[in-house]
Image (cartoon, rainbow, N blue to C red):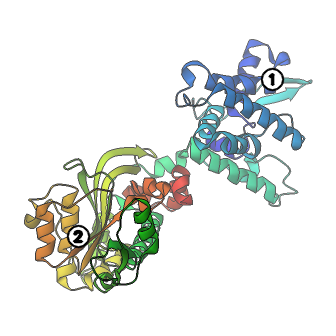
Amino acid sequence: PAFIWTKGSLDDYPAVVLRFFDAMEQGTVDSFDKLKSLNSVMSELIDGSNRRNMASVSIRRLAAFRRYLLTYLGAHCRITPTLTRYLYRVAVSFMGRSFARELAGKLLEYPRADENLVRYLLIKHDKVIFSPEHFELPHEFQQRVLNPGPTFDGKALPDHYLDLEKEREKLVSLTAPYLTRAEANSLKGERGTEWALEKEYLFHARVNGLVHRVARRKAREFKSARSWGTIKDGIDWKATIRSRARGENVLYVRESRRWRQNKLNVNIFTPTIFIFDSKPGKGVLNSVQDANITQRYIFLGNKHLIRDDFPKADLVYSIFITRYQIGYMCENHIRKESIQAILFLCTQPWMGLERYKRITARPPRFQCRTSPDEDQELMKFHYPEKLVACGVKYAEEVVLVVCEEGWKPSAGLYNFARARSIRLHQLRLSYFSPNLIERMKQIHFISTPLKKHPEREAIVERFLPDFFDS
């Protein structure tokens, strides 16, 4: 039903259309009022048990929202708001994204009964009646057939119809993502190897680049310290005046940290780890492997394409994750992981064969080919420290650790890094925006059938619209 609504073959609100059907069956269609039905659906969302995630929304704010909506409609000379261009936009701006999504989801509710039999409505003798017979729902829908409005003698529909369709598709992605029957049939089969998403790699690369810039900037900052007979890099007048106000007779000076910059040689292969929860032993390890062409064909289930002149199957590791929660969507073809910590041994967005080629071009000492769970040197550590220790093992000079304020490496980890002359450079999570950190706490993987699907990106975007906007 959501797919048919995006093409324009259901009215503005599927939930209201359903009530119209009920009114026809009850013989009360003459007294049916679309606006009253719309208000009734919205009231059901707010009242009683249907108010699931809206306990924090006050009645006063809801009343103000209604007044604002009516004023907004009056300014646009409308009586009944459309879902995409009026009601949802007003709800987002006035009530917040969470409220707006739940409201839109309620208004898009429509039963998914027998998909092979469909009834439609006829206007006959100034009355609306049910179709005399059912018809089979086709597997593929043509935009020209389903989209309302004139086709102008078979020519392409005007742009505003296509814009409306895109707006509806975006809203469905936020509230009720779907797979068409043709897509679901083509995705049947075992999940196979799971694959990372290209746009998620791009997002992580941008975040790692930001971390590197912040680390360099922090290394150049001055530190204010009490003077013990020298003025070092100059007097810190602000700190000195504050100390005098506190009744102290102390001179504060500025101590340059520029000497650290020479040691902070950060590059694209500098191990960078984010620790969102430092409680030991909480997460379960997951990894991202980068394979050569032979191993890649094996992962894709295309062994028949492997030729005799192909190299021996090989892979390296570049990302490690400790997760504590898993969720599935898109009929289990997309897996969402909530993570405790994530380690990047390569911070660039290269994928597949290119990533494997770049990593294996480095000296063997910096190529990770053993999982931390199987590495004897790392057995003494617990997660998430084990990921930090893994980064230390494959680092050149420094490991960047983005962590909660107050986190400190254990004595064992400190000695492990010191024995390899590797420095742990810490940055607080608070240096970065809360929205960015919340986004980093999630990662997604797709199944092999979805990876091989020609419309992969469109399907993923349908289920992860916010992720594609990030």
What is the number of callouts on the image?
Answer: 2
Residue 137 can be seen, yes or no = no
383 left or right, relative to 120: left
Contact (CB < 8 A) between labels 2 and 1?
A: no
| Real-space Cα separation, disc 2 to disc 1, in angstroms | 69 Å
Of badges 2 and 1, nearer the viewer stands: 2
Residue 278: mark in rendering? none
63 left or right, relative to 317: right
- Residue at image location 72% in from the left, 28% down from the top: 63
- Residue at image location 16% in from the left, 68% down from the top: 370
- The three-letter code of the residue at mark 1 reads Ile
- Residue at image location 88% in from the left, 26% down from the top: 124
- Residue 261 spot, x, y in % from top left: 33, 83
From this view, report whether residue 141 is shown above or below residue 20.
Answer: below
Between residues 175 and 169, which one lies in front from this camera angle?
A: 175
- The three-letter code of the residue at mark 2 reads Gly
- Residue 244 spot, x, y in % from top left: 42, 65
Within-10-Å neighbours for mark 2: few <14, some 14–19, many 20+: many
From this view, report whether residue 419 is shown above or below residue 390.
Answer: below
Residue position marked by numbered label 2 in the rendering: 391
* Picture quadrant of residue 301: bottom left
Between residues 188 and 429, which one lies in front from this camera angle?
A: 429
* Picture quadrant of residue 255: bottom left
Dot 2 or dot 1, earlier in sequence: 1
Residue 237 can be seen, yes or no = yes
Residue position marked by numbered label 1 in the rendering: 129
- Residue 249 spot, x, y in % from top left: 35, 67
> Which quarter of the rendered picture does the N terminus lie within?
top right
- Residue 60 spot, x, y in % from top left: 68, 27
Say what secondary structure mark 2 lies in.
Answer: helix
